[in-house]
C-alpha cells in the first residue's frame, strides 16, 4: 500500500534530522578540492530533494517536477567529478575556470559513470527523466495540460500517483548520492560504518 504524501514528507524530515549530525562530523582537509566540491554537491542535492518534497506537500507539484532534472544533473556532475574527472580539471573548476567545458553532456556523463560502475543505472534513469520530467522542466505539453480539468476548465490537476513516485524516487536518489560523502567520514574515522548503514537502510 502506498504511503501518503504527508508520510513521505515526514520520512524525509526524519531522515534529514538523522543525517545532519553525521554530516557535521565529517572533516575535510582545506587542500582537498575534490572532497570540498563533493560536500558542496551533496548539500545542493539535499536542498533540491527537500524542496521537491515541500512543494509537493504544498500542492505545488508542477514546480516540484521542474526540479527533478536539475537534481539528477547535479547528481551526475557530482559523481562524474568524483569518479571520472582528472585532478587537473578539478583544480580548474574549483577556481571557476571553464566549469561547463569540464563536464560533458548528461548522456556522456551517465554513460561514463555506468561504464565505471559496470551497470546501466544512470543511463536508464536519464532516459526515464528525458521521457517524463524534461517536459515539466521546460514548460512543455504535460506541464500545461496539467492545468486543465476534463471539461477544459482551468485548474491544477495533481497526479497523486506521480507525486508519490517522485517523492519516493528522489529520497532513494538522495540516499545513493550521499553515501559517497559519508564514506569519507568512515574512512577518516569521524563516522562509524554501522551508523551510516543504519541511516541508509
Image (cartoon, rainbow, N blue to C red):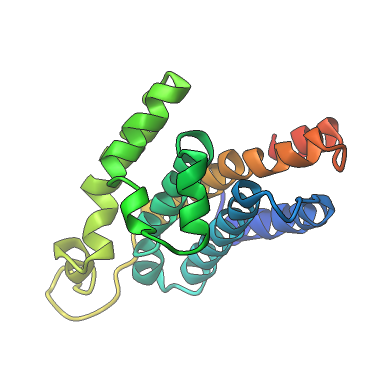
The residue that appears at 45% across and 40% down in the rendered structure is 80
Most distant residue in the bottom direction:
154
Left-right relation of 125 to 175: left
Image location of residue 116, percent across then percent down: 44, 24
The residue that appears at 76% across and 51% down in the rendered structure is 29
Residue sitting nearer the eye, 78 or 56 = 78
Image location of residue 18, percent across then percent down: 79, 52
Q: Quadrant location of residue 201?
A: top right
Residue sitting nearer the eye, 21 or 115 = 115
The residue that appears at 71% across and 57% down in the rendered structure is 16
Image location of residue 178, percent across then percent down: 63, 45
Most distant residue in the top direction:
118
Image height of 118 relative to 130, above or below: above
Left-right relation of 183 to 63: right
Image height of 174 relative to 183, above or below: below
From this viewpoint, is residue 66 visible?
A: yes
Residue sitting nearer the eye, 157 or 121 = 121
Most distant residue in the front direction:
88
Image label count = 0
Residue sitting nearer the eye, 157 or 38 = 38
From this viewpoint, is residue 2 visible?
A: no
Image location of residue 181, percent across then percent down: 67, 44
The residue that appears at 80% across and 35% down in the rendered structure is 186
Q: Quadrant location of residue 106?
A: top left
Image height of 35 relative to 120, above or below: below
Amino acid at each position: 500500500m502506498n504511503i501518503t504524501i504527508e508520510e513521505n514528507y515526514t520520512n524525509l524530515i526524519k531522515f534529514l534530522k538523522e543525517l545532519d549530525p553525521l554530516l557535521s562530523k565529517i572533516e575535510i582537509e582545506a587542500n582537498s578540492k575534490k572532497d570540498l566540491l563533493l560536500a558542496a554537491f551533496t548539500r545542493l542535492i539535499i536542498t533540491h530533494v527537500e524542496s521537491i518534497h515541500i512543494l509537493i506537500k504544498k500542492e505545488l507539484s508542477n514546480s516540484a517536477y521542474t526540479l527533478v532534472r536539475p537534481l539528477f544533473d547535479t547528481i551526475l556532475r557530482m559523481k562524474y567529478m568524483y569518479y571520472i574527472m582528472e585532478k587537473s580539471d578539478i583544480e580548474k573548476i574549483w577556481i571557476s575556470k571553464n566549469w561547463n567545458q569540464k563536464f560533458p553532456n548528461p548522456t556522456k556523463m551517465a554513460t561514463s559513470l555506468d561504464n565505471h560502475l559496470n551497470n546501466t543505472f544512470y543511463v536508464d534513469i536519464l532516459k526515464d527523466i528525458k521521457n517524463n520530467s524534461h517536459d515539466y522542466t521546460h514548460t512543455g505539453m504535460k506541464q500545461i495540460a496539467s492545468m486543465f480539468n476534463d471539461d477544459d476548465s482551468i485548474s491544477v490537476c495533481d497526479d497523486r500517483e506521480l507525486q508519490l513516485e517522485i517523492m519516493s524516487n528522489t529520497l532513494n536518489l538522495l540516499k545513493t548520492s550521499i553515501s559517497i560523502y559519508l564514506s569519507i567520514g568512515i574512512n577518516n574515522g569521524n563516522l562509524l560504518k554501522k551508523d551510516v548503514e543504519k541511516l541508509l537502510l
